[in-house]
Image: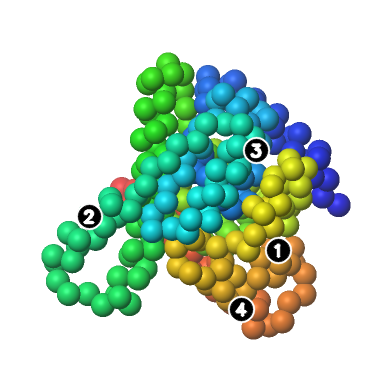
Amino acid sequence: MFDAEKEKVKIVKYIRDYFKANHLDGVVIGISGGKDSGVVAGLFTEALGKENVLGVSMPCHSRQSDYLDALSVASFYGFEIVTIDLASTFDNFTDKISQLGEFSVEQLHNSNINFKPRLRMATLYYLAALYSSIKHKTYIVAGTSNKCESFVGYFTKWGDGVSDINVLGDLTVEEVVKIGEVLHLPKEVLYKVPDDGLSGQSDEEKLGVSYQDITKYMNGEYLAKDIQEKISTLHKNSLHKFGIPTYKK
């Protein structure tokens, strides 16, 4: 039985121990307005104090509701949040790409979707370096991917899959929600349907399977054959995201 209160205490201790051992001070977190980043923010606020947490909202032709939810999370936990609107940066880059030739919307679709989280991660690392300089203490970037997402490769390589520390990496979606309840994360954030805010589809619509079924698959529970095969394929096809093959002479 998963004890969310005990797990929360263990994660907070893990964060404190890691920061102390590595002489770290602050953390930068991309706040999307979803439960994963909200739970991460709550954990780090408790572990380090709100004065050592910087939240970053990075709209890029995004929904206004997600931005408002991000502000709600920051207000609830009391940490600083800055907004870096990446829309003009994205537009400028894609305008340069259009000069290479005429591409259809379908051809550009995946490139455009994956470019946004890469822009966002570059922004987080820039701010971590900047705050380390102006605050005279070391900031690092926290990841927000959970175990279910990682298992099926539902993240952008060198985008939201990159971080200096990930405290949700061994927690399923259901477990993240339970810890969010312990942290009293605002309900409109904790229980909203998860999506990337980029494609117009929910996570589960894009994946073609539910997070509940992914958890069952990882736990070895019974699933219909077609669902098992779908999850297995997603997992196998994403293994390249977890390491760089390096030739050794």
- Quote the CA–CA distance across marks 4 and 3: 41 Å
Determine the CA span between mark 1 and mark 2.
40 Å
Secondary structure at numbered mark 3: helix
**Structural crowding at the residue carrying mark 2, measured as other residues with C-alpha within 10 Å and reported as few (<14), some (14–19) or many (≥20):** few
Colour scheme in use = rainbow
- Residue 163 visible here: no
Above or below residue 76? Residue 113 is below
Within 10 Å of the Cα at label 1, are there few (<14), some (14-19), or many (20+) other Cα atoms?
some
Q: Nearer the viewer, residue 240 or 157?
A: 157
Give the mark, 2 or 4, whose residue is nearer the N terminus: 2
User: Which residue, as the protein is rendered here, is positioned at the far top?
Assistant: 136
- The percent position of residue 26, horizontal first and vertical second, equals 52, 26
The residue identified by callout 2 is: 92
What residue sits right under mark 3 in the picture? 76
- Mark 3 → mark 2, Cα distance in angstroms: 35 Å
Quarter-of-image position of residue 94: bottom left
Mark 4, residue position: 229
Residue type pointed to by label 4: Glu
Type of the residue with mark 3: Phe
Which of pointers 4 and 3 lies earlier in the amino acid sequence? 3
* Residue for badge 1: 215
Q: Are marks 3 and 2 in contact (CB under 8 Å)?
A: no
Relative depth, front residue between 48 and 2: 48
| Label whose residue precedes the other's in the sequence (3 or 2) | 3
Q: Position of residue 190 (x, y in %)?
A: 68, 53
Left or right: where 130 falls relative to 55:
left
